[in-house]
Image: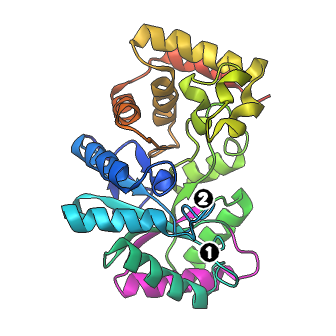
């Protein structure tokens, strides 16, 4: 499996990131183990999680995904064969959030304990913290890197202005720089990333690992009417795409998929992989059939005509 350099970092990752937000939510531990075994067994290496996953699920308190990954690592070994990414900053409990040095020093230890590892390959600021000085956050990351607890750092949900400001501080103060950005990015959510943010990432060589790459499943083609939403946990998230624009994107994916003997979701991922700014889009699976489709997407190389057709149908409006 060919690997891509993540930004200017020392990390080399496979072209699809496995999104572990489903662990402890729509995938129990046994299923999660099977999915991880299948993903790594297919030659992939990049796992993305966060401390807050999956706090939103009734009965959960956060950290469930990290715990499952930690248990899997303990059972399987091979820590050096994967690139492990996690995030901090979103509220875990009252008073436990943000990017202050004090909180970061506690949060990293909690994540390391749950993950049952000595280091995190990519530690990401889950969202910007306007209440904490950028230099304080980057200085704390520098301490963690020096201590060997973190290898590289990334940002998630940052605006172009705030990412640029952070990169400027890194250069001026000789502090670690964000090597990756995790924005929302898919064929039906292009406006937020494309433009100043994408241009900045290309100029500064910041790797991009966008989330919701399949738009909560809409781009797989399984939601073609409101009736398809019934009984599905993520159904409500796709309602905004059930319109002429969304169906136009699906039509283009269907047509290209037919030419490539593939599924619409695979073509949607292949389009992202072909994007010059994108390092490894994030996609999740909750069963082995979905995983099989996901990993095969990395084998698809779209030609210029296919990319042009998809571009035209999904152009932001």
Above or below 37: residue 219: above
Q: Residue at x 69, y 85 (%)?
A: 95
Q: Is residue 154 shown in magenta?
A: yes
Region of the chain picked out in magenta, as a range: 128-155
In the image: residue 281, left or right of residue 289: right
Above or below 113: residue 22: above
User: In the image shown, does 139 or 27 lie closer to the viewer?
Assistant: 27
- Whether residue 301 is visible, yes or no, is yes
Q: Quadrant of residue 135?
A: bottom right
Q: Tell me the SS state at disc 1.
A: loop
In the image: residue 55, left or right of residue 287: right
User: In the image shown, does 98 or 193 lie closer to the viewer?
Assistant: 98
Mark 2 burial class by Cα count in 10 Å: few <14, some 14-19, many 20+: few
Numbered label attached to residue 59: none
Q: Which residue is mark 1?
A: 92
Q: Is residue 18 shown in magenta?
A: no
Query: Looking at the picture, how far across and down is residue 264, in whole percent?
Result: 51, 21
In the image: residue 22, left or right of residue 223: left
Q: Residue at x 47, y 60 (%)?
A: 49
Q: Residue at x 67, y 61 (%)?
A: 158
Q: Tell me the SS state at disc 2.
A: loop
Q: Quadrant of residue 290?
A: top left
Q: Which residue is mark 2?
A: 57
- Whether residue 305 is visible, yes or no, is no
């Amino acid at each position: 499996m060919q690997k891509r350099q993540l930004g200017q970092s020392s990390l080399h990752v496979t072209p699809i990131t496995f999104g572990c937000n489903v662990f402890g939510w729509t995938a129990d531990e046994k299923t999660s183990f099977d999915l991880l075994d299948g993903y790594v067994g297919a030659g992939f290496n990049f796992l993305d999680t966060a401390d807050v996953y999956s706090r939103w699920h009734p009965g959960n308190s956060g950290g469930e995904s990290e715990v499952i990954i930690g248990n899997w690592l303990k059972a399987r070994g091979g820590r050096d064969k994967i690139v492990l990414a996690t995030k901090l900053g979103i509220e875990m409990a009252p008073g436990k959030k943000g990017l202050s040095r004090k909180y970061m020093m506690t949060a990293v230890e909690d994540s390391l304990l749950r993950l049952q590892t000595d280091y995190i390959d990519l530690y990401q600021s889950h969202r910007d913290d306007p209440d904490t000085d950028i230099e304080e956050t980057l200085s704390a990351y520098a301490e963690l890197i020096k201590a060997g607890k973190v290898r590289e750092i990334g940002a998630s949900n940052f605006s172009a202005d705030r990412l640029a400001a952070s990169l400027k501080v890194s250069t001026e103060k000789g502090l670690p720089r964000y090597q990756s950005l995790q924005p929302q990015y898919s064929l039906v959510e292009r406006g937020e990333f494309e433009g100043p943010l994408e241009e900045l990432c290309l100029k500064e060589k910041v790797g991009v690992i966008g989330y919701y790459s399949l738009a909560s499943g809409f781009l797989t083609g399984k939601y073609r009417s409101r009736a398809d939403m019934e009984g599905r946990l993520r159904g409500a998230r796709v309602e905004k795409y059930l319109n002429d624009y969304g169906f136009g994107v699906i039509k283009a994916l269907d047509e290209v998929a037919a030419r490539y003997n593939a599924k619409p979701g695979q073509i949607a991922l292949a389009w992202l992989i072909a994007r010059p700014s994108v390092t490894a889009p994030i996609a999740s699976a909750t069963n082995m059939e979905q995983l099989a489709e996901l990993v095969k997407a990395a084998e698809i190389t779209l030609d210029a005509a296919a990319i042009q057709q998809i571009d035209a149908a999904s152009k932001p409006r």
